[in-house]
Image: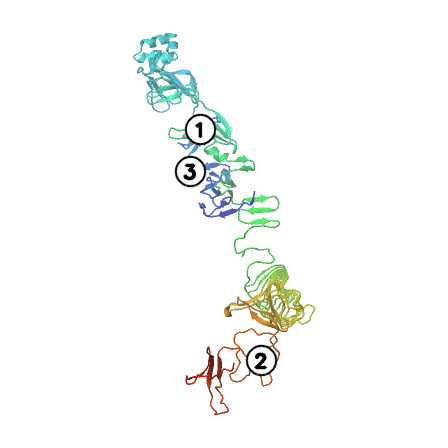
Amino acid sequence: MADPKIRIRRSSTPNKVPNITQLELGELAINTYDGKIYLEQDQGAAGVGNTVVRINPWNVGLGTTAYNISFESGKVGIGTTVAQYNLDVGGNINFTGSLFQDGSAFTSGVTVKDEGSALSTQATALNFVGNGVVATGNGAEKTITITSGTGAQGATGATGAQGAAGAAGAQGATAAAGAQGAQGYQGASGGGGGGGGASVTVSSNPPNSPSSGDLWWDSDVGEMYVYYADGDSNQWVETSGGSETVVVSDNAPSSPNHGDLWWESDTGQLKIYYNDGDSAQWVDANAGVLSSLTVWQSNSTGINTTSNVGFGTTTASAAITVGAGGTITVGTGVTIESSGQATFVGVVTATSFVGSGANLTGISAGFSPDAQGNLVAGTNAGDSFTGTDAENNILLGLDAGTAITTADGCIFIGQNAGEVNTTRSSLVAIGNNSGTKVNNAYGFTAVGDQAGKNHQTGQYSTYIGKSAGRGLTGSATDNTIIGGECHYNATSGSYNVSVGKQAMSLASDANNCTAVGTKALQTSSQGGSGGDNNTALGYEAGDQLVTGSNCTILGFNAQASSTSVSNEITLGNANVTKFRVPGIGVTFKDNGGTPTQGHVLTVDANGEAGFAAASGGGLATSGGTLTGTLNSRDIIPTANNSYDLGSTTSRWQNVYTTDLQLSNKGKTNDVDGTWGDYTIQEGESDLFLINNRNGKKYQFMLKEIS
């Protein structure tokens, strides 16, 4: 069985009966005042009870009548499902002793008289047959009068030839009108044989419009029926006295007949097919009072009953009801008394315990708040409180908060959790061996097995995860460490944030670091030097950096250029070949190599920039020499009227241009002290000069020399 425990509810209120909302299937309710046991019955196989029944419907007397059994109400039927009287027996009764009627002995047997004179013997039963029988009289004596027949009775004698063989039969034959025919039937097995005319039908259904004496052979069941008229009613009756059968099976037989017996082998119950004229059904053969006495059934799992069972009580109001003063004993380990007291030797295991536990006694560590709001459970947990000073602490587990004297509002759950703290309030350590050394540390929180195990006095530190920060000791402060084995090897270091499994797990004394991601900055400061002020974000980001400081490393498996480099920013791992800033339209790409001296920044047709060697040479940003050809668009000086193209000693050999724009605006010439703005343009045969200040145009006077 999945749950072998018996759950019992009880009440001492007289006449109180539980309803289906107060009981679950399998629970017992005991009314200790009435001595009744109740249970919840489910015959719909839905797993939800649909009624509450009483296990012991009978009552047992008290004191000198303790063995008397009685019923409070209802009729008792034996051999019938419809009891019409207080005791209604559908069958024979066998008893010893005397039978009383209204307090007087009842004389067995019936006196039979012939015309007023008693016969020499007494009978226990009388059977009167034939038409015209009338019983009259008052009291114990009845007068039976047989009048002349009506003639219809003679028609029922289908075996008329047999009646002719007897003298009485002959007289019946002369009385076809009726009266004498009845006498012939009485005297010689059907002396009214003059009936004749009876029909015989073979079919699966009864013939239509039958006459008294007709025969019908039911071909479906192989039974002979005769149509019988008794003066009050007409019906087909079986000539063989019945076709009752006995079937042993798990399921009810098909097409049963009235009186058939069925032994239900699954439950060990005997049932009889009963037709009361209005309906037909299988009923228990032990119905009535016997059903209460033989309610036990057996199957492959054992003995069971769907009725309530009472012990020491006549009113079983629940599945098992134990009367006042009764006791249930299971072996030597369990005792349940009717008063509600229960004793268990050993461990009691349950899915839930209901109630405040205020009445529990004999338990060394209660599990309900004390007067100061402390909830304590576990050996030595909270065993050092100073008077009533310590308030609102939750201490659960072996030695949890065992040293607290006056601290308030601490939560220590787990073996040795917060075991040395004495006075510092509002600390949290949840998990076996979490925060075992913490004392006098503001804002300490540790959650997980061995989380913050060796932390002592450092302020505002948080450790979450198995072994998170377990090695940090002394005054390590303002650390936030979240993740299994995160930062677990370091013994000192402050102002760090490490989040992720084994993030900074091998660090020694790093400070001011931020590591987010599994194994991020795992070896930072390993060995006890450097490794401060680093930031790494991503799986294994910067996990090879050891002594380098002030580095920023972002991306999956992104690594610094060396284990000792400092002041470096690394974006991405070696597989990243482009750097984009979509907001400003900048994309840098890999041109297939590492830029070196003389490389220039170029932009391809896709607008992506990259460093590459200049075609024919290189262009220095300052003080260098341009060799080769400069391919560009506009070359614009950074200031107006400030820089030269060439010099007095270094002139351009040729200047190739279209129109030539000339302007000395911003200064004056050396001739008349003015400034001008001209454009020289080329014609097919002439050269023109345009004064851009006044719009006048001039033609150069050219002299052809060849």
Residue 210 got which mark?
none
Q: Is residue 681 above or below residue 370?
A: below
The residue mark sitting in front, 1 or 3, is: 1
The amino acid marked with disc number 3 is: Ser
Q: Which residue is mark 1?
A: 273
- Label 1 and label 2: CA atoms lie apart by 133 Å
> How did the renderer colour the structure?
rainbow
Task: Give the image location of residue 100, x and y in percent.
Answer: 43, 28
Specify which label sits upstream in the sequence, 2 or 3: 3
Specify which label sits upstream in the sequence, 1 or 3: 3
Q: Is residue 547 left or right of residue 97?
A: right
Task: Give the image location of residue 621, x and y in percent.
Answer: 59, 77
Q: Specify the farthest residue to the bottom.
A: 672
Q: Quadrant of residue 111?
A: top left
Q: Residue at x 49, y 77 (%)?
A: 658
Specify which label sits upstream in the sequence, 1 or 2: 1
Q: Which residue is mark 3?
A: 73
Q: Quadrant of residue 445?
A: bottom right
The amino acid marked with disc number 2 is: Gln
Residue 653 got which mark?
2
- Label 1 and label 3: CA atoms lie apart by 27 Å
Task: Give the image location of residue 38, x and y in percent.
Answer: 48, 43
Q: Is residue 439 left or right of residue 128?
A: right
Q: Residue at x 45, y 33 (%)?
A: 288
Secondary element at tag 2: loop
Crowding at dot 1, Cα within 10 Å, few <14 / some 14-19 / many 20+, comes out as many
Contact, mark 1 vs mark 2 (Cβ under 8 Å): no
Task: Give the image location of residue 374, x and y in percent.
Answer: 56, 63
- Label 2 and label 3: CA atoms lie apart by 137 Å
